[in-house]
Image (spheres, rainbow, N blue to C red):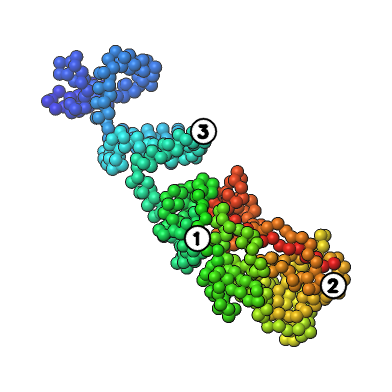
């Protein structure tokens, strides 16, 4: 043996003294067997009888636990880089979704390559240190994060069950965490909004939204001096940065609502405020089109008042409804603001006809005849406020040039014959009667004909002039309205709501589901039923 080298008695190789373990029984204090040979001998002995090895280790630990802990700590300190590299590789393999047997096999291959290749060893140590796993706390956090990603669905189910069983406790925990971590909340909100990208709110829609709400809070109806542009469904619950998800709210309601669903998880205390029931700008435009002077909320001609009403004001919770408003107004015409915004020509056509401002012709100048469905659809879309509707028969009045100037559609069913649509380009004296006579003679109709009159535009005097008799009225109809427009309730069936709305629940009513997704109930007037025998 030299001063720096010693020959191993097992393999016979000369190795530096640092490659030999301590043996205090020998005079020089070193073992005669190198570390590699001793490790191989121990591995073989363990493989031959693992239980004997475990018992020996357990006996040693029980005899002197403090010394055992010191040995373990020293071993971990000596092999920290190796252990960190092995753990990091194991986490990578588990995250990749490999089976346990494959993870164990690759883990052993990594250990062998680590021990045999110094370059690979240096790269692995550098990577593990760069991953910032040098402290126990960092390793715990990273391990927990990887586990949560691998068991995401199970974790969501567990948290949901815990919340259902411990709602009050969960609220207290969440509230305490929010109070203790305001910076994290702000940072998470910033990350979430940055990930969504720039908002798709358009200036035109935001201007209209402000006009529609008349400067009032969407939730409580108060004049919103400090207007906040609010997401109706918050970004936490998959709300979108789109026009249909934007409303203006006062600061108090915006702060109180947080991320809760409107009218399901949170409701504002609505109080009656000075909300205007008419749309001033649209009323002024209507008065200019008719050549009349605008009064306080309406225009009037021949004792008939015309109102352009605010759908926002009449859809406020616990607010004023149209039937209540119309009860003491006498003979009036009620137009919704959205109808004027999107169907100005059709509204003007109806209002001028009711006020007697249309050009009038006699029915003798026109010829009654069948018209095609495409001609009828185009005509109703242009001149009827409710647009077109599928029917069985379409009849029109043509002038001498062959242009359709009036149209009517009829539906033949087991319940009778329904006059579904009736529209005129201009006033034609006797035109309605001529269309009915042609229809009855052409198809030999002997059954009664019934139809419905929208009482927002009159009491049905035109029906009574041609022989119709009033036969009752329907219940109060209703639709749903948002900042995007009016939607008929029949368009919001449960299947449609479940498909389109992310937070639809069968446990809640139709109105609650609609409110949570930005639609409010708009109650209209009943329709009168008329029958012609």
The percent coordinates of residue 201 (x first, y second) are 46, 62
Q: Residues within 10 Å of mark 3 (few under 14, many from 20)?
A: few
Residue 199 seen in this snapshot? yes
At horizontal 58% and vertical 49% (from top left) the residue drawn is 512
State the image quarter where residue 40 is shown: top left
Asked if marks 1 and 3 touch (Cβ < 8 Å), the reply is no
At horizontal 59% and vertical 66% (from top left) the residue drawn is 336
The disc at residue 274 is 1
Q: Taking 146 as reference, is 424 left or right?
A: right
Real-space CA distance between mark 2 and mark 1, rounded to the nearest whole angstrom: 53 Å
- Residue at the spot of label 2: 440
- Residue at the spot of label 3: 165
Sequence-wise, which precedes: disc 1 or disc 3? 3
Q: Taking 82 as reference, is 285 left or right?
A: right
Asked if marks 2 and 1 touch (Cβ < 8 Å), the reply is no
Kindly give the residue lying farthest to the left in the view shown.
3
The percent coordinates of residue 214 (x first, y second) are 49, 63
């Amino acid at each position: 043996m030299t001063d720096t080298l010693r020959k191993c008695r097992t393999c016979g190789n000369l190795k530096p003294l640092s490659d030999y373990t301590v043996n205090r029984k020998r005079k020089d204090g070193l073992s005669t067997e190198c570390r590699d040979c001793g490790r191989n001998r121990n591995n073989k002995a363990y493989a031959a009888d693992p239980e004997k090895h475990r018992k020996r280790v357990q006996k040693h630990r029980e005899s002197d636990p403090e010394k055992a802990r010191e040995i373990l700590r020293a071993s971990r300190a000596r092999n920290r880089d190796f252990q960190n590299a092995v753990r990091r590789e194991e986490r990578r393999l588990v995250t990749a979704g490999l089976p346990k047997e494959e993870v164990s096999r690759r883990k052993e291959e990594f250990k062998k390559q680590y021990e045999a290749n110094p370059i690979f060893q240096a790269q692995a140590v550098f990577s593990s240190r760069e991953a910032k796993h040098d402290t126990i706390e960092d390793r715990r956090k990273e391990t927990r994060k990887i586990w949560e990603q691998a068991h995401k669905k199970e974790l969501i189910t567990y948290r949901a069950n815990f919340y259902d069983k411990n709602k009050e406790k969960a609220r207290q925990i969440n509230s305490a965490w929010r109070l203790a971590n305001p910076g994290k909340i702000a940072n998470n909100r910033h990350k979430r909004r940055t990930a969504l990208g720039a908002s798709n709110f358009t200036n035109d829609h935001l201007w209209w939204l402000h006009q529609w709400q008349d400067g009032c809070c969407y939730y409580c109806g108060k004049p919103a001096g400090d207007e906040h542009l609010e997401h109706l469904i918050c970004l936490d619950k998959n709300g979108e940065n789109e026009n249909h998800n934007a409303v203006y709210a006062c600061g108090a309601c915006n702060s109180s609502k947080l991320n809760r669903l409107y009218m399901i998880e949170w409701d504002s205390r609505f109080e009656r405020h000075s909300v205007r029931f008419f749309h001033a700008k649209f009323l002024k435009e209507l008065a200019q089109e008719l050549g009349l002077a605008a009064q306080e909320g309406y225009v009037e001609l021949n004792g008939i008042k015309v109102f352009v009403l605010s759908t926002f004001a009449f859809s406020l919770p616990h607010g004023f409804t149209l039937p209540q408003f119309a009860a003491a107004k006498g003979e009036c015409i009620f137009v919704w603001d959205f109808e004027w915004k999107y169907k100005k020509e059709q509204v003007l056509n109806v209002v001028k006809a009711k006020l007697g401002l249309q050009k009038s012709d006699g029915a003798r100048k026109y010829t009654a005849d069948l018209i095609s469905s495409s001609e009828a659809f185009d005509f109703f879309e242009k001149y009827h406020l409710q647009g077109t509707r599928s029917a069985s028969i379409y009849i029109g009045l043509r002038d001498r040039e062959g242009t359709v100037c009036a149209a009517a559609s009829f539906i033949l069913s087991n319940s009778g014959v329904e006059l579904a649509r009736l529209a005129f380009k201009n006033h034609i004296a006797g035109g309605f009667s001529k269309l009915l006579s042609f229809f009855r003679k052409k198809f030999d109709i002997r059954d009664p004909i019934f139809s419905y009159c929208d009482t927002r535009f009159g009491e049905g005097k035109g029906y009574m002039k041609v022989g119709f008799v009033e036969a009752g009225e329907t219940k109060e109809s209703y639709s749903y309205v948002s900042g995007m427009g009016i939607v008929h309730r029949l368009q919001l069936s449960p299947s449609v709501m479940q498909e389109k709305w992310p937070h639809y629940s069968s446990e809640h009513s139709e109105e609650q589901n609609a409110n949570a997704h930005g639609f409010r109930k708009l109650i209209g007037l009943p329709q009168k039923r008329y029958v012609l025998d």
